[in-house]
Amino acid sequence: MTMEELRKQAAETGEVTIPGDIKVIPEGAFSGLSNLKKVTILPGVEEIGNAAFKDCSALESVEIPDTVKTIGSYAFCLCTSLESIELPCGITEIGTSAFEDCNTLKRIALPDTLSKIAVKTFLRCSSLSEVSIPDSITQIDAGAFEKCSALASIRIPDSVNSIGLFAFGGCTALKDISISRALFNENKKYFRPFSSWIHVRT
């Protein structure tokens, strides 16, 4: 099936299965389909393009195979019914604002093939309360978890050597931060508002 046919099917049925012979889901391929509830991506697909599912406000279920390496910027932005998503090992890049404003997303476990959490990846994911950051992560960019107002605790692994501005800004429930001494010393000013809740690892 062509992408045009797949989009039409998704609009009519609320579901779509993307075959593995489509290596890249194009930019904006299913964006704005307000009745799309379920997406199944079959093995063989390697990239989810920028804004591919942006503003699919009814989207509840997404199955991603371990052949996917890249999730583009804004790919699932404004998917306001998406409560959970499993990100398989193999993903090496998640773009800017990929899950921005997914305000019912409750938990996320990042794969250990990822090295960076990009700018505003989870901005305003206001229900996000569980985050697992693997030891492969070296960089948490600006605004990565900004305004995740349900996030109460976070463990930042020793592998992280850079935290951008407002990465955890507006995380008003954040009461438990575990961080290495070296990273804490480099970012004392930034972590000052959370100083009474920080556990600095030696």
Image (spheres, helix red, strand yellow):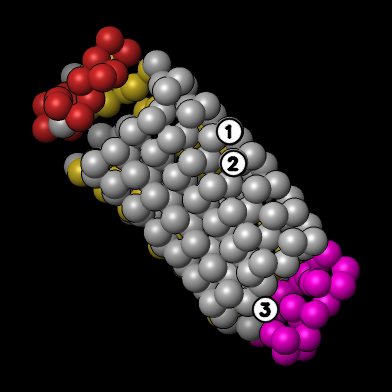
Q: Nearer the viewer, residue 66 or 25?
A: 25
Q: Which residue is mark 2?
A: 103
Give the residue type that dot 2 points to: Asn
Give the residue type that dot 1 points to: Ser
Tell me which numbered mark, 3 or 1, is placed earlier along the sequence: 3
Task: Give the spatial CA distance, label 3 vs label 2.
Answer: 30 Å
The residue shown at (26%, 19%) is: 193
Give the residue type that dot 3 points to: Gly
Tell me which numbered mark, 2 or 1, is placed earlier along the sequence: 2
Whether 35 is among the magenta residues is no
The residue shown at (63%, 60%) is: 55
Contact (CB < 8 A) between labels 3 and 2? no
Quadrant containing the C terminus is: top left
**SS class of the residue under badge 3?**
loop
**SS class of the residue under badge 1?**
loop
Contact (CB < 8 A) between labels 2 and 1? yes
Task: Give the spatial CA distance, label 3 vs label 1.
Answer: 32 Å
Tell me which numbered mark, 3 or 2, is placed earlier along the sequence: 3
Q: Which residue is at the far top?
A: 196
- Residue stretch rendered in magenta on the structure: 1-21
Residue 162 in percent (x, y) is at 20, 44
The residue shown at (55%, 56%) is: 77
Contact (CB < 8 A) between labels 3 and 1? no
Q: Which residue is at the far bottom?
A: 2
Whether 8 is among the magenta residues is yes
Residue 61 in percent (x, y) is at 73, 53
